[in-house]
Image: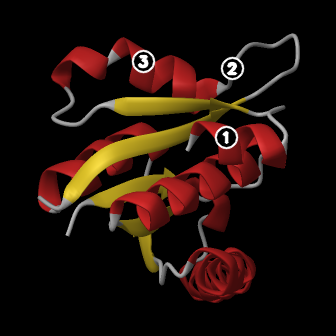
Amino acid sequence: MRKFLVVLDDTRECLNAMRFAAMRAARTGGGVQVLSIVDPADFGAWVGVGDIMREEARERIAVHFEVFAKWMRDRQGVDPELVIREGEAVPEIMAQIREDPEIAVLVLGAGTDSKGPGPLVTALSKQAGTLTVPITIVPGDLSKERLEAIT
């Protein structure tokens, strides 16, 4: 099955990327894979405390994912898959694309503030020539109606 890979993070633009991926998957008979990346640097130097923090991060991700997953299932008829990886974002996204041959499109949300489109869009755009899949960049300020019209 052709999958749309979308990154789950704490940015506002993530919401439109999720919506776009689900709508495209629903309209084309594809699936959605939601990737969340845990930064190991967030867990400090103490192994025991780090393990607890890592588990708490995974639980927060699962709860956050379930909000999107419920919407995708109820509104779009798409049952998304959650993948959690640990490491730096760009290398982990690249690795996920390499490891899953069903991923056909990477969907990213672009920020709308004056700082630019965001670190993932900036970094992955620079590596677009080395990716084996196209990148779809979804503007973070598109309305639901506009997203529906273009998907």
Classify mark 2: helix, strand or loop.
Answer: loop
- Residue 71 percent location from the top left of the image: 71, 78
Side (left or right) of 123 relative to 46: left
Q: Are marks 3 and 1 in contact (CB under 8 Å)?
A: no
Q: Residues within 10 Å of mark 2 (few under 14, many from 20)?
A: some
Mark nearest the camera among 1 and 2 is 1
Mark nearest the camera among 3 and 1 is 1
Give the quadrant of the N terminus.
bottom left
Classify mark 3: helix, strand or loop.
Answer: helix
Q: CA distance from mark 1 to mark 2?
A: 22 Å
Confirm whether residue 151 shows in the render. Answer: yes
Colouring method of the image: secondary structure
Q: Residues within 10 Å of mark 1 (few under 14, many from 20)?
A: few
Side (left or right) of 147 relative to 145: left
Q: Earlier in the sequence, mark 3 or mark 1?
A: 3
Report the disc number at residue 125: 3
* Residue at mark 1: 149
Q: Earlier in the sequence, mark 3 or mark 2?
A: 2
- Residue 32 percent location from the top left of the image: 43, 67
Residue drawn at point x = 62 percent, y = 47 percent: 17
Give the quadrant of the C terminus.
top right
Q: Residues within 10 Å of mark 3 (few under 14, many from 20)?
A: some
| Type of the residue with mark 2 | Pro
Q: Are marks 3 and 2 in contact (CB under 8 Å)?
A: yes
Side (left or right) of 78 relative to 104: right
| Type of the residue with mark 3 | Ser
* Residue at mark 2: 117
| Type of the residue with mark 1 | Ala
Confirm whether residue 12 shows in the render. Answer: no
Q: In which quarter of the view is residue 149 placed?
A: top right
Classify mark 1: helix, strand or loop.
Answer: helix
